[in-house]
Image (cartoon, helix red, strand yellow):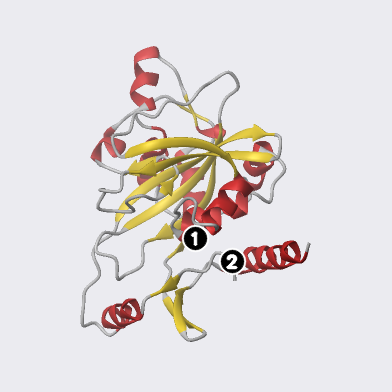
Amino acid sequence: MAGLVHLPEEFAAQAAAFADGTKTPAEPRDAATVVLLRRGVDGPELYLLRRHVSMEFAGGMCVFPGGGVDQRDFDHSVAWGGPSPAEWAERLGVDEAKARALVCAAVLPLTEFLDRRGLVLRTDLLGAWSGWLTPVFEPKRYRTWFFVAELPEGQRTRDVSSESDQVVWLPALRAVEQAEAREILMLPPTYITSLDVAQYADPQAVIDAAADRRVEMFCPAVEEEGEGFTLTRPPHADELLEQRARTARWGSRG
């Protein structure tokens, strides 16, 4: 099936060691990432960064911009517009303090700019999309909340991260196709999110869909797949992957 991650057998052994208590999983760090969208001819386009190959976590992978939550995100006070921290807490499945920190982490260092200019953080321009927790067998783990946002009209992106060596805008479906062809590398959450977003006609449709979403953190586990092993997916992802596999089979007949 398109998008499945086939794992070496030793990964299954590692996962079993964590499951039976032989090993203790690393404590995950909270993080926020933003699926930045813009309107394209063939549907929504995604802003992707390629992490340096030398990076300890996800080296060489194409990812969405974001970062870890730190104490500054809890301490920072910024003028707030849109859904309240209490509403964000309900959407993100956390308490109000963490909800506020996650939203700030999603837009930092923009909050400092807003402070200097006396501007308001428009949280209504963000949407809550999904949550992914790194598998237990990984030595470095993140509990990541995925947000969606449309690039404001007239604005341009500028990569200022020291962790990436390339940035690109790609139609969501094209990003999926390139990942399947191994032209770019993606972790399962990025691939599934790209495939999910590719189902919508434009960025506004994605933002509208996000209004009804409530984040449930998902942690992939190892399971048998044929003669090998793969990672489990969130329930909604199986339908997406099955539909994608049918499309790929139909295309190969053409």
Question: For residue 13, what is the image quadrant?
Answer: bottom left
Residue 216 is labelled as 1
Which residue is the site of mark 2?
2
Name which residue lies at 40% across and 45% down: 32
- The amino acid on which the numbered mark 1 sits, given as a three-letter code, is Glu
Question: For residue 10, what is the image quadrant?
Answer: bottom left
Mark 1 surroundings: few (<14), some (14-19) or many (≥20) residues within 10 A: some
Question: For residue 162, what is the image quadrant?
Answer: top left
Q: Where's residue 136, x and y in %? A: 31, 70
Q: Please, is residue 122 above or below residue 207 in the view?
A: above
Mark 2 surroundings: few (<14), some (14-19) or many (≥20) residues within 10 A: some
Query: Element at badge 1?
Result: loop
| Furthest residue in direction right, as rendered | 254
Q: Quadrant of the C terminus?
A: bottom right
Q: Which one is in front, 136 or 12? A: 12
| Furthest residue in direction top, as rendered | 117
For discs 1 and 2, the disc positioned in front in the rendered view: 2
Q: Which one is in front, 217 or 163? A: 163
